[in-house]
Amino acid sequence: MKNILTSPFVEEMKKTTANMYRLGWDERNGGNISYMLDENEVAQYLDTGKVIRHIPIGFDATALIGKIFIVTGTGKYFKNVESDPENNLGIIRIADDGTTAELLWGYADGGRFTSELPAHLMSHIARLSVDPENRVVIHTHPTNTLAMNYVHELDDKKFTHTLWGMCTECIVVFPDGIGVLPWMLCGTNEIGEATANKMKEYRLVVWGMHGIYGSGKTMDETFGLIETVEKAAQIYMLTAHLPRINTIKDSEMKQLAEFFKVDYRKDFLNL
Ligand code: 13P
Ligand code: ZN
């Protein structure tokens, strides 16, 4: 059996959480990541027949029975994942009852998965229904995206359109746009359901005055989506209070989308 601490998936979780912490997006225990793993790959590092603990998940995840995820722990700091993965991360498998998680590794100090597991697993289900290759869901609190929530309307089309206009490549990176939820109580099945509902249409969902969710096939793709939104939000926050002289026109955004052959939300442009 290979040493799990050297596995590519633990390495990716360590690198990503450290990176996000240093970007200032994940203060204290802010943020969480779930990453669906390949069972055969996990079996090279773990005896997948050995369950350490059973943890109730509090909702029906029948669509994910047998699926294995590596997930950040609740109350754990992204700052600490790199130096202590076994306490700050866990590997879980959704049990045959669909409502229990089988702990295969991690949460070594008796901890458990993120309080946002409903939003994560429901988002996985929603994304897999439209993209069978989806593997990653990231939640984080990026500073400028969050700041923008206080000064910009929380509306899918208006929020997306503003961000598309902030960096030339935005419409190419997230042509499907961004879903935006109002402020809601976090950690609940309700916010999980609302997030998943948006995830059927969007790979990015803003939680009003809280943070953002991103999803994708790989860690790089998912991180890159959020990073691009945050960069655009930064440009917005640096310029929103200044007289606007130049603007990327809707006709130019259309040109970009067509040139780079992306399937974009045509109804989000005002043409
Ligand atoms: P957890 O510590 O439970 O992952 O919660 C962090 C967070 O960002 C809540 O939205
Ligand atoms: Zn949060």
Image (cartoon, rainbow, N blue to C red):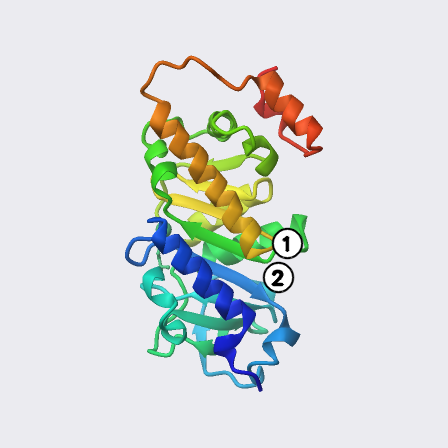
Q: Residue at x 31, y 20 (%)?
A: 241
Q: Label 2, secondary structure: give it.
A: helix
Horizontally, is 31 left or right of 246 in the view? left
Q: Image height check: is 207 above or below 252?
A: below
> Which label lies toward us, 1 or 2?
1
* Corner quadrant of residue 212: top left
Horizontally, is 61 left or right of 180 in the view? right
Horizontally, is 242 left or right of 49 in the view? left
Amino acid type, label 2: Ala
* Corner quadrant of residue 143: top left
Q: Position of residue 225 (x, y in %)?
A: 52, 44
Q: Image height check: is 44 above or below 27?
A: below
Where does the N terminus fall, quadrant-wise? Answer: bottom right
Report the number of discs. 2
Q: Residue at x 54, y 50 (%)?
A: 222
Judging depth in this view, the residue of 185 and 45 nearest the camera is 45
Q: Position of residue 20 (x, y in %)?
A: 40, 53
Q: Residue at x 57, y 85 (%)?
A: 47
Which residue was labeled with disc 2? 63
User: Quick check: marks 1 and 2 in contact, CB under 8 Å?
Assistant: yes
Crowding at dot 2, Cα within 10 Å, few <14 / some 14-19 / many 20+, comes out as: some
Q: Position of residue 153 (x, y in %)?
A: 40, 26
* Corner quadrant of residue 253: top right
First in residue order: circle 1 vs circle 2? 2
Q: Is residue 182 visible?
A: yes
Amino acid type, label 1: Leu
Which residue was labeled with disc 1? 128
Where does the C terminus fall, quadrant-wise? Answer: top right
Task: Specify the label residue 233 is tagged with.
Answer: none
Q: Can you tell me which quadrant of the image ligand 1 is in?
A: bottom left
